[in-house]
Amino acid sequence: MSSTVSPRLSPREKQVLRDYTKGFTEKEIAFHLGISLSTVKTYGYNIRTKLHAEDKAHAVAIALQSNILT
């Protein structure tokens, strides 16, 4: 993914992605944000889809490389 491409992540998706970069588990993210584990998993799926990421680690790498969270 090019660093000039900026996918449109919702504010909540950015929160989940930011917690991914901190190494939080999905269960920890759910507790931290006060949402269900199922909802975190849905956000994770949406993030990976929008970033064309293979998995959570790949999504984090793309986010850091593309400055999505700044």
Image: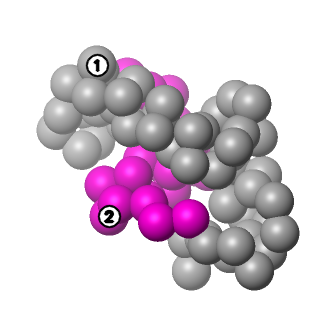
Number of other residues with Cα within 10 Å of mark 2, as a class: few under 14, some 14 to 19, many 20 or more: few
Find residue 62 and report its horizontal and vertical position in percent.
75, 56
Number of other residues with Cα within 10 Å of mark 1, as a class: few under 14, some 14 to 19, many 20 or more: few
Q: Main secondary structure of the magenta part?
A: helix
Looking at the rendered structure, the secondary structure element under dot 1 is helix
Q: Nearer the viewer, residue 19 or 3?
A: 3
- Whether the magenta-drawn stretch holds residue 30 is answered as no
Q: Nearer the viewer, residue 22 or 35?
A: 35
On-image quarter of the C terminus: bottom right
Q: Which residues are magenta?
A: 7-27
Q: On the picture, is 47 further left or further right than 5?
A: left
Q: How many marks?
A: 2
**Mark 2 lies on residue:** 11
Q: Nearer the viewer, residue 60 or 3?
A: 3
Which amino acid type is marked by label 2? Pro
Going 65% across and 34% down the picture, which residue do you hit? 56
Find residue 22 and report its horizontal and vertical position in percent.
58, 49
Find residue 51 and report its horizontal and vertical position in percent.
64, 50
Going 46% across and 39% down the picture, which residue do you hit? 46
User: Disc 2, disc 1: CB below 8 Å?
Assistant: no
Q: Which mark is residue 16?
A: none
**Mark 1 lies on residue:** 38
Find residue 52 and report its horizontal and vertical position in percent.
69, 43
- Whether the magenta-drawn stretch holds residue 19 is answered as yes
Going 27% across and 28% down the picture, which residue do you hit? 39
